Image (cartoon, rainbow, N blue to C red):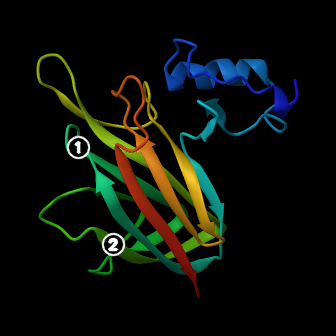
Amino acid sequence: MKPSEVRDYADSGLTIQYAMIDHATRFPDRESRPKYLLWNGQRIWTSDVWTTTEKGVVRAEFLSCKTDVEQGFDIKVDGWLELAQGMRVPVLRTWKDERLEDAVEYPFFARDKRLRVWNVYKMTYPGGQIVEEKWTENAGFWVEQIGENERIYHCNHGMASPPDFESLVFKASVQPF
């Protein structure tokens, strides 16, 4: 199959997670497989990978967030993101919290010159157990490319059915060193 033969899954009855599995089955060659799937004509991703510089500053800002589910995003590098106290972590998880500023900014070092981004959310299971999740059920997003070093993510958490890609909207940008 060719990428032009990518199926639009919006009316398939599948969740985004199962649509990704079907998509991988339809395009078994990882190298030629489109990294996204279609949903109502929109390219949907479960994670995004940027090619960037080895060192820089990443800034992320919540633009809007519906409050029915606690939501946030992860930024990951093969290296470190440096927190304000000097602590270095490979993955930065940031939750939308009304008590905190809407924007975060951290220096980073990425050995492979890649920055990885995805949305996260808290799911409540029967019995009241709350679990931090990513990539489950209907989780995904479409990417609005603003420039080479700036993107806006329009996210759906895993529990929304049908997906609402305006459930969480955040902007990420990279300032190379």
Please name the amino acid that badge 1 sits on: Glu
Can the viewer see residue 43 in this picture? yes
Where is residue 28? Give x, y as percent: 79, 23
Question: Secondary structure beneath disc 1?
Answer: loop
Where is residue 22? Give x, y as percent: 66, 17
In which quadrant of the rendered view does residue 30 lie?
top right
Where is residue 65? Give x, y as percent: 28, 51
Question: Sequence order check: which comes first, mark 2 or mark 1?
Answer: 1
Please name the amino acid that badge 2 sits on: Val
- Residue found at the very far top of the displayed protein: 13
From the viewer's perspective, is 109 left or right of 94?
right
Which quarter of the figure is the C terminus placed in? Answer: bottom right
Where is residue 106? Give x, y as percent: 40, 76
- Residue found at the very far right of the displayed protein: 2
Q: Which mark is residue 70?
A: 1
Q: Residue at x 56, y 22 (%)?
A: 10
Q: Residue at x 38, y 76 (%)?
A: 105
Q: Can you identify the residue that label 2 sits on?
A: 104
From the viewer's perspective, is 3 left or right of 157?
right
Which quarter of the figure is the N terminus placed in? Answer: top right
Can the viewer see residue 91 in this picture? no
Q: Count all numbered tags in the image, as a single digit.
A: 2
Question: Secondary structure beneath disc 2?
Answer: strand
- Residue found at the very far bottom of the displayed protein: 177
Q: Residue at x 11, y 64 (%)?
A: 99
Q: Is residue 49 above or below residue 21?
A: below
- Using the image as rendered, state which of residue 58 and residue 19 is in the foreground: 19
Mark 2 to mark 1: distance in Å? 17 Å
